Image: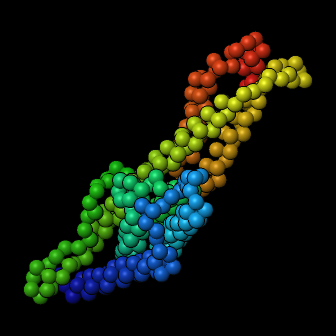
Amino acid sequence: MNYDSTQRMKELTVAYEGFEVKAKESFNSIYLRHERPSKSHMTYNTPSTASSSSNEGSEDLYISEMAYFSAILHVATDLISEIPLYVDAEIGLLRSICFGNCCLNKLLQLIGGQDGKELSTLSIDQLFELIVWIESFHEVVEEAHPNVKSNEAKREFRRRKPSMFLYDLREEYSHQPLLQMSRAVPVLTWILAMYWKVHMLAQDEFLIRTKATTDKWLQQVYSMEREVWQTKEGRLVTSLCEDLVTIISAQIWTMQSRLSGSSSSAFIIGVCLTFSRLREKQLDSRDIFFTDLDSCCAAANNFL
């Protein structure tokens, strides 16, 4: 290894370590403003029989957790916004790796590790934010590093991250780790793959919530007693159709507004799931409308 190569390696190593320090300090600043509450003490659905002080305490914990989550994403967004700023390609690549990896570790802490064991404790809005943020990260990295393809990262997921360093055992190097730029692209690809893993887990949790919410609303609508009434045209109908349009529109509007700008299929899948649950509920419940001739006519006319 010649002098120029050795000097360049030292410069890259210093830059790498500097980026790691900056990322860690950025996230450490959050703890000066937000003390994250323990998940074991979080209560999102406070029982109606609980005391007023207990309700207030649970609400404070919930607000604190929301603030902590927002602070994490805010810092992560600030760090990621700096990725395209470097002209030096190698320095820029190291910056993406350090910032991307540090943000990834914080997100994994939020969701309970690579298996997402605590995703169920996030609110639906937080799931939307997480999905959109990960997609934004992929777009920034792909634009800054065209040779790194996030689609390929989806197929190359491994639980263990490749190392950026080799250890030189020669005495003159004092066993110091040597930065290997040849490993930079594989390491960044692994980071992207991990983000896709988190994205998939968050999307699955979002669909579970969507199914549960849709089923709950549909159950309420279909269990209501309805009177048959006559339109100006003389058709017998009930309010079932109007009630369904209201709740389905609200569900779709919520997903669309939260996932605006999203490039994923989460919104499309969510809409398809919503209508699938509606179809299934209608098929399961249609016999309850066939009590007499007027009810049968109204059931036939409801969706005209």
Q: Nearer the viewer, residue 109 or 62?
A: 62
Question: Which of the pair 189/160 is nearer the observer?
Answer: 160
Q: Residue at x 46, y 78 (%)?
A: 31
Q: Is residue 293 visible?
A: yes
Quadrant into which the C terminus falls: top right
Q: Nearer the viewer, residue 233 or 143?
A: 233
Residue 91 seen in this snapshot: no
For image coordinates 38% across by 59% down, the residue present is 112
Q: Position of residue 12 (x, y in %)?
A: 31, 81
Left or right of 85 in this view: 261: right
The scheme the figure's colours follow is rainbow
Q: Position of residue 256 (x, y in %)?
A: 63, 49
* The N terminus: image quadrant: bottom left
Residue pictured at 36% horizontal, 59% vertical: 113
Image location of residue 125, percent across then percent down:
57, 56
Q: Residue furthest right?
A: 232
Q: Is residue 6 left or right of residue 244?
A: left
Can you say whether 276 is above or below 249 in the image? above
Which residue does the image show at 52% across and 45% down from the upper left?
209
Q: Position of residue 122 (x, y in %)?
A: 50, 57
Which of the 4 image quadrants contains residue 96? bottom left
